[in-house]
């Protein structure tokens, strides 16, 4: 199959209506989209990504009103968050209606729901009378794509079309929030909306789900090996790690400064201004780029652990976990 790249919303629409897959831009990362009501299309998503079918998919719609029609129950807190953060880098886990195939949720009674904030994909969703199931548009276990080119590198030959909406403005996946039995909010994945902002709107603490406490059903965003580059990545104190790996041609990912003792061309600064937004936007592109360089190891430092910084550190930790 030849994979085309373009900005043709009508073509994207036709393919999706026929049950084909289209990679679509969002503000977080590119998604690999198919008709969420069509099981054959959903199966193609798992196939193209090489993703285990026990791993559920996020369902995307054009407005939060449309999303509400897919949920069997919307707690008052959820509606409050929808009004505030949708469209945006925010996903809610809610009880599903039966129109959502079990294949989409991997058998769970909960469905992950999101309204992406990207002009092309919003326009596309307006032309469809079904929502789009879409995981990140990367082969399973690899770094999420933040440009059409990244998608092409991973999925060429496996999907007919990539809708090119330019580089993603947030650059990290959406925050995923659900509720426990008493409707207390639970964070399943840190992402584009910092937990602090959710807490400010809710007026209560959001419970974090720790990786090592995870129970079934597993959220793959919680699998430690996710977001992994192919080269080993070590996270920690840069001068110490530089010394430890001096004989393995290291490359660096730093937050805002360069370090002495290594050529500038082997150091990538996520944000010289110290902006977490800019760092988030750059992270996946940098991981991919450094992966392609002639280097034995990638050495990285944590960014400040507040706001978006938590999601950045989370992705760096998972990238590191792959080789531990
Ligand atoms: O920003 C994003 O969320 C991007 C864009 C494309 O929307 N999507 C994305 O999808 O990151 P994906 O499939 O790569 O990650 C979604 C995560 C997975 O870890 C999945 O296990 C979890 O959401 N998830 C989806 N539905 C779920 C469900 N019903 N119950 C528990 N976890 C669920
Ligand atoms: Mg993913």
Image: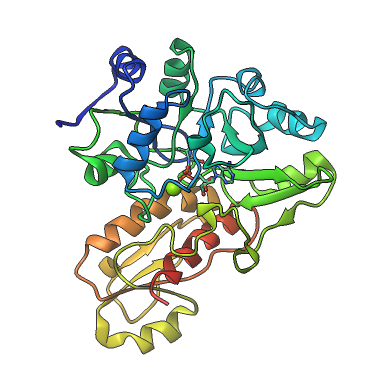
Q: Where does the image place residue 176, in percent across and percent down from the top left? A: 61, 44
Quarter of the image where one finds residue 291: bottom left
Q: How is the image coloured?
A: rainbow
- Residue 275 seen in this snapshot: no
Out of 139 and 118, give the one closest to the viewer.
139
Quadrant (top left/top right/bottom left/bottom right) for the N terminus: top left
Residue depicted at 54% across the width and 53% down the height: 276
Quarter of the image where one finds residue 30: top left
- Residue 303 seen in this snapshot: yes
Out of 101 and 200, give the one closest to the viewer.
101
Residue depicted at 33% across the width and 40% down the height: 147
Quarter of the image where one finds residue 272: bottom left
Q: Where does the image place residue 69, in percent across and percent down from the top left? A: 65, 19
Q: Where does the image place residue 53, in percent across and percent down from the top left? A: 43, 46
Quadrant (top left/top right/bottom left/bottom right) for the C terminus: bottom left
Question: In the rendered view, would you say 75 is above or below 124?
Answer: below
């Amino acid at each position: 199959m030849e994979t085309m790249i373009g900005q043709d919303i009508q073509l994207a629409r036709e393919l999706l209506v026929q049950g084909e897959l289209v990679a679509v831009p969002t503000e977080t990362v590119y998604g690999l989209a198919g008709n969420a009501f069509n099981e054959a299309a959903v199966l193609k998503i798992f196939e193209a990504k090489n993703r285990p079918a026990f791993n559920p998919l996020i369902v995307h719609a054009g407005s939060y009103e449309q999303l509400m029609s897919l949920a069997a129950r919307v707690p008052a807190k959820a509606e409050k968050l929808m009004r505030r953060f949708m469209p945006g880098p925010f996903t809610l886990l809610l009880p599903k209606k039966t129109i959502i195939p079990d294949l989409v949720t991997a058998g769970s009674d909960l469905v992950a729901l999101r309204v992406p904030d990207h002009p092309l994909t919003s326009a596309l969703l307006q032309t469809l009378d079904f929502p789009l199931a879409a995981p990140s548009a990367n082969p399973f276990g690899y770094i999420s794509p933040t440009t059409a080119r990244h998608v092409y590198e991973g999925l060429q030959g496996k999907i007919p079309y990539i809708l090119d909406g330019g580089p993603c403005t947030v650059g990290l996946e959406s925050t995923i929030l659900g509720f426990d039995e008493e409707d207390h909010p639970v964070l399943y994945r840190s992402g584009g909306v910092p937990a602090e902002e959710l807490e400010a709107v809710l007026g209560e603490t959001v419970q974090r789900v720790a990786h090592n406490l995870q129970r079934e059903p597993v959220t793959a965003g919680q699998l430690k090996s996710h977001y992994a580059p192919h080269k080993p990545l070590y996270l920690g104190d840069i001068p110490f790690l530089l010394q430890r790996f001096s004989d393995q041609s290291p490359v660096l990912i730093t937050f805002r400064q360069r370090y002495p003792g290594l050529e500038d061309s082997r150091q990538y600064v996520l944000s010289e201004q110290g902006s977490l937004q800019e760092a988030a936007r750059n992270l996946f592109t940098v991981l991919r780029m450094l992966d392609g360089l002639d280097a034995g190891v990638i050495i990285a430092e944590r960014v400040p652990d507040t706001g978006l910084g938590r999601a950045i550190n989370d992705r760096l930790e998972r990238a590191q976990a792959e080789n531990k």
